Image (cartoon, rainbow, N blue to C red):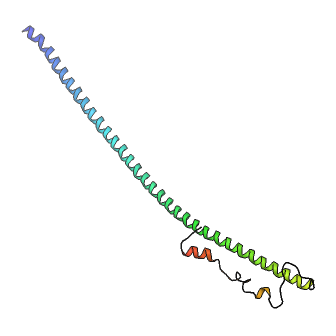
Amino acid sequence: MASSRGNSPQIQNSGSEEDLMDQRKRKRMQSNRESARKSRIRKQKHLDDLTDQINQIKSDNAQILTTINITTSQFVQLDAENSVLKAQMGELSQRLDCLNEIINLINNNNYATTHCMSAPTGLYEFDDHHDFMNNPWNLMYLNQQPIMAAAAAENGLYF
C-alpha cells in the first residue's frame, strides 16, 4: 500500500497539471478568439472607412466633372460670341475707314472750292450738279449694319 500511496500524489499532481494546462489552453483559445474578433472588427471598420472615402472621392469627381462641363460650355459660348464681335469689329473698322475717307474727300473738296476756285486740285474734280454727298454710291455704307457677322451669328457660323 505504501507504493500505491506514493503513486497517488503523483497522479493527482499530473491530473491537476492537466486541468491547469487545459485551463491555460482554454484561456489562450478564448484570448485568441477575442483577438481575432477585434481584428475582424478593425478590418471591417477600415474597410467601411475606405468605402466611405471612395464614395466621397466619387462624389467629388462627379462635381468636378460637372464644373468642367459647365466651364467648357461657357467657354465655347464665349468663344463664339468673341468671334462674332471680332467680325463685327472688322466690319465696323472698315466702315469707319470708308467714312473717314468720305470726310477727307469732302474736306478736300470744300478746301478746293473755297481756296482754289480757279485751279482744279488734280485729284478730285467735282461738278456742281454732281455733289459727292448726294451720290448714292458714295453713301452706301452710312446706315448699313454689319451684315456678315449678324448673318453668321443667325446661321450659327463663327469665325
Residue ranking furthest to the top: 2
Residue projecting furthest to the left: 1
Q: Is residue 18 above or below residue 79?
A: above
**x then y, percent, for residue 143:** 69, 83
Q: Quadrant of residue 135?
A: bottom right
Decide: is 2 above or below 18.
Answer: above
Residue at 42% x, 53% y: name it: 58
Quarter of the rendering occupied by the C terminus: bottom right
Residue at 40% over, 52% down: 55
Give residue 140's position: percent from left, percent from top.
70, 83
Residue 107: percent from the left, percent from the top? 84, 81
Camera-nearest residue between 145 and 140 = 140
Q: Quadrant location of residue 128? A: bottom right
Q: Is residue 103 left or right of residue 151?
A: right
Left or right relative to 97: residue 78: left
| Number of numbered callouts drawn | 0
In the figure, is residue 42 to the left or right of 28? right
Residue at image coords 37%, 43%: 46
Q: Taking 108 as reference, is 4 above or below it?
A: above
Q: Quadrant of residue 136?
A: bottom right
Q: Nearer the viewer, residue 148 or 68?
A: 148
Report the quarter where the N terminus lies.
top left
